[in-house]
């Protein structure tokens, strides 16, 4: 007897960056035929050097390792540096799209003008391409347009008078160091991009000064040759965070940060808040050493600007040729119909959703990747895509109304706290919802690699739907890639953390 596959609902995906591509891959695997709307002339989102909304710059490399800046189906080719370049990432996403036949599903140069409800049920997308407009109805829509599209530049008294020859711009518009060579530039902010650009400028002969309101703890990209996210944002840390009180979790994280990098004031930067969660954690390999060497000057926040002169909150002054603002991004979805924006409590900082994905009043609409994270994006994007695709493909898999109501209440409460969450916590949440969290008790020979190795994307292909036959071997190789997991026996520190995770109080004396 011939098995007849059910006809899947029509699906549109807004955005052909990493979030849109991985969502399309998993929807196609479950029988959907998605249509992707992409405003730029090529795929890749932020990693497309010529993308309309790309915030990357020439010479930029990833903040996370090649193991953690990839999807589970496709590793980077042999010889790829630890931190791939922007161009390497763009090429990687191109190969990924070819692997799953995604490019024919993408409408390039097509800008979404509005997403709203269809009077016949489902959703209507109004789009434009080459001066022509079109309205189409879809049963389901995934919003995967990216979190970092509109740079946020804070208002500072007198900024309209700034007369430096390069003006004031957001770091997303940074064209590379060559433009600023042998000049004086002020970078505002303490985000990853602000620190990276300040370091990049200082290394290129520019007089770099950085000013910020809040001193964050700064981690290097490598700890004893091992990528930081492999060491600090692993599965063991996430599981321990579920067992520990917030105070204990903060103390544990701070101890790890200080052990890896020391305190910023040891290098000549400012002293951060003693509470690591209040201060925040950022990452840059060369920033603190450049401060210690006097190649980057650190200042408190900006009080006012008069012409090319900037006055800081400590009363000191400086003259600058340009100001680059690395002060984050607004969440920008201007094409959402007002009723959708109101339902999800959309503002510049975020939105209120169940599991960052759904809203009970918006059936058939999903959001992927529109959150801030501390750590790698791609493995988390893939887990969320698998969760969303599974919910839509499997009868009864969508969360109940009661579950969603409880989840929305938690999400509203969470928005009152720190905006960014560690990626290992978020990844485990999606993995559990998708039913693909590895079962440690069934893999004793792999337990140490799973707990203390990186949260590699392939480690979530061990169990559940979509399991791969070579996942165990690739998980072990990912854990050993930089020498972090080379022996089967636990270190004393690992054994103590494992005791916390597995609730073995007799082992806590280690």
Image (spheres, grey):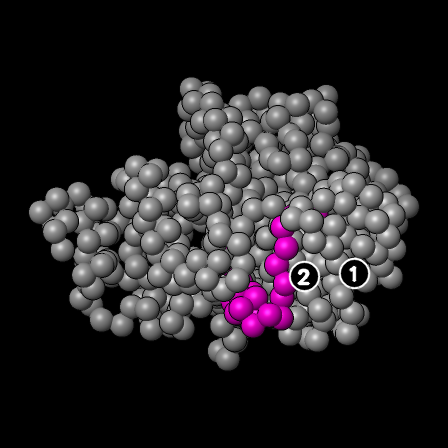
Is 363 on the left-hand or right-hand side of 167? left
Q: Residue furthest bottom?
A: 79
Residue sitting at the far front: 315
Mark 1 nearby-residue class (10 Å; few <14, some 14–19, many ≥20): many
Residue 335 as seen in the image, left or right of residue 220: right
Q: Is residue 484 above or below residue 9?
A: below
The segment highlighted magenta reads 282-302
Residue at 37% x, 51% y: name it.
254
Point 68% across, 41% down: residue: 330
Tag 1 and tag 2, C-beta contact below 8 Å? yes
Quadrant of the snapshot with the N terminus: top left
- Residue 307 lies, with reference to residue 261, above or below; the image says above
Q: Secondary structure at mark 2?
A: strand
Q: Residue 391 location in percent, x, y?
A: 47, 36
| Residue to which mark 2 is pinned | 209
How many numbered marks are there? 2
Q: Is residue 285 magenta?
A: yes
- Where residue 203 appears, as percent x and y from the top left, is 64, 74
Q: Nearer the viewer, residue 37 or 478?
A: 478
Q: Which residue is mark 1?
A: 320
Position of residue 220 relative to residue 109, above or below, is: below
* Depth order, front residue of 370/271: 271
Q: Is residue 451 visible?
A: yes
- x 60%, y 27%: residue: 344
Which residue occupies the extreme right position in the image? Answer: 131
Specify which label sits upstream in the sequence, 1 or 2. Answer: 2
Residue 436 in view here: no
State the image coordinates of residue 423 (x, y, percent, origin top left).
45, 49
Q: Residue at x 76, y 45 (%)?
A: 304
């Amino acid at each position: 007897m011939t098995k007849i596959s059910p006809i899947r609902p029509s699906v549109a995906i807004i955005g052909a960056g990493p979030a849109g591509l991985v969502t399309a891959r998993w929807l196609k695997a479950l029988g959907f035929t998605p249509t992707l709307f992409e405003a730029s002339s090529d795929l890749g989102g932020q990693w497309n050097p010529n993308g309309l909304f790309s915030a990357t710059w020439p010479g930029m490399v990833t903040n996370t390792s090649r193991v953690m800046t990839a999807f589970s189906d496709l590793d980077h080719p042999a010889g790829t540096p630890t931190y791939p370049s922007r161009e390497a990432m763009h090429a990687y996403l191109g190969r990924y799209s070819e692997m799953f036949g995604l490019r024919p599903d993408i409408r390039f140069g097509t800008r979404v003008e509005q997403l709203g409800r269809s009077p016949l049920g489902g959703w209507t997308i109004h789009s434009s391409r080459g001066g022509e407009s079109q309205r189409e109805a879809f049963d389901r829509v995934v919003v995967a347009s990216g979190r970092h599209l509109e740079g946020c530049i804070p208002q500072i008294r007198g900024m309209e008078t700034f007369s430096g020859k390069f003006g004031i711009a957001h770091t997303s518009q940074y064209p590379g160091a060559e433009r600023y060579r042998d000049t004086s530039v002020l970078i505002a902010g303490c985000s990853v991009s602000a620190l990276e650009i300040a370091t990049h400028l200082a290394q290129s002969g520019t007089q770099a000064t950085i000013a910020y309101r809040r001193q964050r703890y700064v981690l290097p990209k490598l700890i004893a040759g091992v990528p930081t996210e492999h060491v600090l944002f692993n599965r063991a840390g996430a599981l321990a965070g579920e067992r520990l009180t917030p105070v204990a979790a903060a103390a544990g994280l701070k101890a790890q940060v200080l052990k890896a990098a020391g305190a910023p004031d040891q290098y000549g930067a400012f002293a951060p808040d003693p509470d690591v969660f209040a201060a925040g954690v950022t990452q840059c390999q060369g920033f603190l050493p450049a401060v210690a060497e006097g190649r980057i000057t650190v200042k408190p926040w900006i009080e006012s600007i008069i012409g090319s002169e900037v006055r800081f909150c400590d009363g000191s002054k400086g003259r600058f040729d340009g100001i680059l603002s690395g002060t984050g991004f607004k969440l920008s979805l201007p094409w959402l119909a007002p009723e959708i924006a109101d339902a999800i409590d959309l503002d510049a900082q975020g939105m209120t959703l169940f599991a960052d994905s759904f809203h009970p009043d918006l059936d058939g609409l999903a959001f992927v990747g529109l959150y801030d994270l501390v750590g790698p994006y791609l493995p988390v994007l893939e887990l969320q895509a698998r969760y969303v695709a599974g919910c839509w493909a499997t009868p009864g898999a969508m969360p109940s109304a009661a579950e969603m109501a409880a989840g929305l209440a938690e999400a509203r409460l969470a928005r009152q706290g720190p905006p960014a969450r560690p990626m290992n916590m978020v990844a485990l949440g999606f993995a559990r919802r998708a039913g693909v969290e590895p079962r440690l008790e069934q893999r004793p020979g792999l337990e140490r690699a799973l707990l203390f190795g990186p949260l590699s994307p392939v480690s979530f292909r061990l169990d559940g739907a979509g399991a791969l036959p070579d996942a165990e071997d690739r998980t072990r190789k990912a854990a050993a890639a930089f020498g972090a997991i080379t022996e089967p026996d636990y270190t004393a520190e690992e054994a103590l953390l494992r005791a916390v995770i597995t609730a073995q109080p007799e082992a806590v004396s280690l």
